[in-house]
Image (cartoon, rainbow, N blue to C red):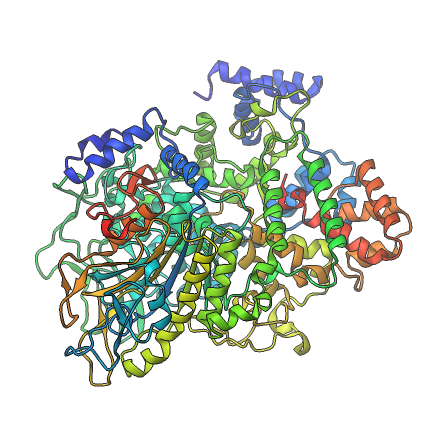
Amino acid sequence: MRRNGVRQLAILQTVSTRSSFLPRLAALLLLPLTCAAASLSSEIDRHIAQKAGGTLAPLASDGEFLRRAWLDFTGSIPTPAETRAFLADKNPQKRAQLIDRLLASPQFPQRMEDAITVMLLERRGGGKVPEAKWREWLRAQFAANRPWNALVHDLILLEGDPKVTPAAKFLADAEKFDQEKATHDIARLFLGMNLQCAQCHDHPTVDDFTQGSFYGIYAFLAQSSLKEDKVAKVTLLAEGVATNRVEFKSVFRKTNEVTGPRLPGGKEIPVPTFPKGEEYEVMPAKNGNPGVPKFRSRPLLAKELASEANERFAHTSVNRFWFQLMGRGLVHPLDMMHKENPPSHPELLNQLAREFIAHKFDVKWLLREIALSETYQRASRAPKGADLAQLKPETYRVANLKSLSAEQVARATMLATGAADWLPKTPSETPAAAAPAAADDTEEDGATKSAKGFNVKAYLNGKLKQPPGNVVDALALFVATFANPPGEPEVEFAPSMSHALFLMNERLVLDWLKPRDNNLTARLAKLKTPAAIADELYITVLTRPPEPAEIAEVESYLAKNTSRPETALGELAWALLASAEFRMIH
Amino acid sequence: MKRWYECGSAEHALSRRQMLGTLAGTAAVGACGLSSLMQQTVAAEMKKQNRQVIFIWLDGGMSQFESWDPKPDSEFGGPFRSIPTSVPGVHISELMPHSAKLMHHLTVVRSMCTKDPNHSTGVARIQRGDPANRGVNYPYLGAAVTKLLGTPANGLPPYIWIKPGSGGFIYQEAGFLGAKYGALALGEGKPPIHIQRPDTISDADDAARNELRRLANARFRLDRRESEVDAYEQSYDMAMQLMKRKELFDNSRLPAKDIARYGTHPLGRHLLQARVLLEAGVQFIKVTSYHWDTHGDNFNMSQQLVPQVDQPFAALIQDLADRSMLDNVLVVLMSEFGRTPTINSRLGRDHWPDAWSLALAGAGIRRGNIVGQTTKNGAFVDGEGYDVGHLFHTIFSALGINSKKIEYKNNGQPLPIARDDCEPIKLALA
């Protein structure tokens, strides 16, 4: 298939549209070699071009690309100095160099920590393991570029006490281990299957989502439960002895069905039976060790799910990382991967999955290849003469808009206003005078007062007057405002009235816009001409130089407000922070 | 879709037929992509009628003996007398003298017979209409009504919840309908803090900075197909509309004369605030009052508590009547259950779902009306008892929503809006 002549020709055509005559000649001479070595990024462009059905947008401007890459790979925007240096850089390789630099930066693991935490935990909170511990662990995984399948394997295997094991936060970080919730999460996040309907009956409109597929996964987890080892004083997600297949009944058919552990599309694993008394590898002790049965299905799930042989896992994984950078899954919605909802580019999805496996589930490699593609680097404005109605998101003819996550809004706002420079990083570094006063929290409906630090709920109810005085607390306030409710995936832009009210009226944000040290408005106040002011403002907030009309707008606004120049500068900056351009990765 | 035909139970016959009716020709789409055409039609109908609801929730359980269904001189009756009302022959507790004078506007149902004797599950269960377990989280009444009536075009949040304690956006109320149908809760009657613009920003400054923002968005909007920009702009429009109406949430502007009529305790102030919000056009208002759980010292507590609802409830009914709003506004006053006939060793009454009372008034409700009765000693329903399912059918019917026909759609799954084994309480309906 890969040596197929038609395909070689197609690659050659792609190459020829992108390069000058000389490399084209070289490519022609080295034809077999070129084809074997065709990078995934150029393959992405070939697949997208093939099905575009119209003109593709040109590459994004340097500023647009720079902002996109920074937000995608570091979770924030670049400093004005970074932006100026990048715009001035004449090196034709500067985009690839930037991608490599950002992927190697310490902010990259932090960005992945933010994104994957939202994806896996969906802001559900609670549990014994503090979210900070989970985040620390997850960050270390991405700092070490741990293979994705190995990470997922650990999440499901879950060895160690769930009360203290960070990885447990995904599966069992609660008072009880909920087998049904675990089945739903695993199916949705790692297999692209929303099996909500299938728990009680076969999905009414999706043939692939059967009740049997739900219970096949469930059967892997059916013997797992939290057990306390009172001797060793630990809790474990222990497994009991499986004696039978799992029984289930559709609410529409009154007959019982059974299944053993089975992954969707895979073979059922036979449940072995042992003579009585010989079921255990390690016998359970009274009040102590819950024991280890000879047949354990959860380790089998961890292994089989996150394996090279599981096509659904590979497809779902690459689809989610693709979505993270491209704003739309090749299969969309992300958890509706089934026959009736085929991928927009089936061959591309196959190739991404195949090469992700070949590169041992290397997330950084995958993200880099996607980012190096023209498809990723395309402008978000329509190409000249294109019919806007025809620019469907699944064609990727223009870059799809992605909304900033709550964390990205917070980090980018702090960076742009300059608060990132002077705000203490953590509550412990916050000077006593700026530390929030104890909340007067006398609620009957369960609001808890955190022992130290900032009580977001009390602040949002007007019971705590002092705004956050450090980055950690400010992040918490932004997350409380901009994040989706717990349990709701964050895959779509969901602007709400409360976001707007926050940006318009939150004292914290308005304070950050007052001149101080060398922050944004202090720097603007020192500049003499409207052109210089507009330049510093737009470079800092929007990572691009202003258009002439925008310089004129700054000039006329300042001319109208000569009696209150500092406030006017704050208002100009506020308008950009509150604009759609700032709120979106474009 | 084909699997639905395999379902042979009579229970689902109706559902399947309706699903075919609404989904015929609809391609299989995403998990949550199916919206009901039927509901849109209803929403359009309802908007014309401007139906509103005030739902008053006495959390913990008000005693029916000390309110709507007194049994003086009976073994469980307690010390309070009953008094005549504006409807000849109808008596209620002497602790409700104000409501007694307005009985001709009310329907009192004395034959509620529900199942759950626990607060923790009872509150959610009752406010969700005690749905059969279908593996989904049903919406609370306020979210349900918001969905079924459609959001009014007045720019005000459709579902407001006035409560003691803290406020915020309570998305949990929406259940499977999705967060946007949640309640905007005003903790202690106060609006979200960000509705207040800092004093340092004048009207003119605010208009100027937002004009800059709009110009920036208009430039960004050019040559972009996405509607994201419009959605973002709209969220600001909504925010500014709410800010313009912030006097609606300003308790210091409530008329002094009305404060005296409604009472200065929280429930009085919150019901007065609810009246102002109803006048402004808010579609559904829930007002919650806590601490009705009189396990100990029931009689002294009732003597103190019942007047706290009697006075503002009557003032509200009177005000709605005076303003000709009772034709459009449905008033519901209830708890999660009633209280035991037997009096425990601490002179308290415990939880009693078997026979209890609630009051309805306004839109679609019969006036001057008692539905059902209890046995002589008040312990049990005498005759037909009504469950929460019947109540939800009654509330929806009063709002003009055909609860036997209209269904929710969740992931393509048709779900009844009220228990399909219950009917509206016809005797309560106008």
A204 or A336, nearer to the observer: A204
* Residue located 43% across and 36% down the image: B44
Q: Is residue A248 left or right of residue B315?
A: left
**Which x, y percent locates residue A575?**
72, 48
Residue B287 picture location, percent across and down: 42, 63
Which residue ends up furthest to the right in the rendered image?
A528
Task: Identify the residue shown where x is 46% and y is 37%.
Answer: A319
How many callouts does the rendering have?
A: 0
Residue nearest the observer in this picture, A236 or A342 = A342
Tell me if residue A204 can be seen. Answer: yes
A81 up-or-down from B317: above or below: above
Residue B417, position as x, y percentages in the image: 30, 45
Q: Is A190 on the left-hand or right-hand side of A569?
A: left
Residue at the extreme front of the image, as rendered: B88
Q: Quadrant of the N terminus of chain B?
A: top left
At 13% from the left and 41% from the top, the residue drawn is A254
**Whether residue B20 is situated above or below residue A198 in the rendered picture:** above
Residue B126 image point, x, y percent? 29, 59
Task: Inspect this view and state whether residue A297 appears.
Answer: no
The answer to which of A135 and B294 lies nearer the viewer is B294
Q: Nearer the viewer, residue B100 or A52?
A: B100
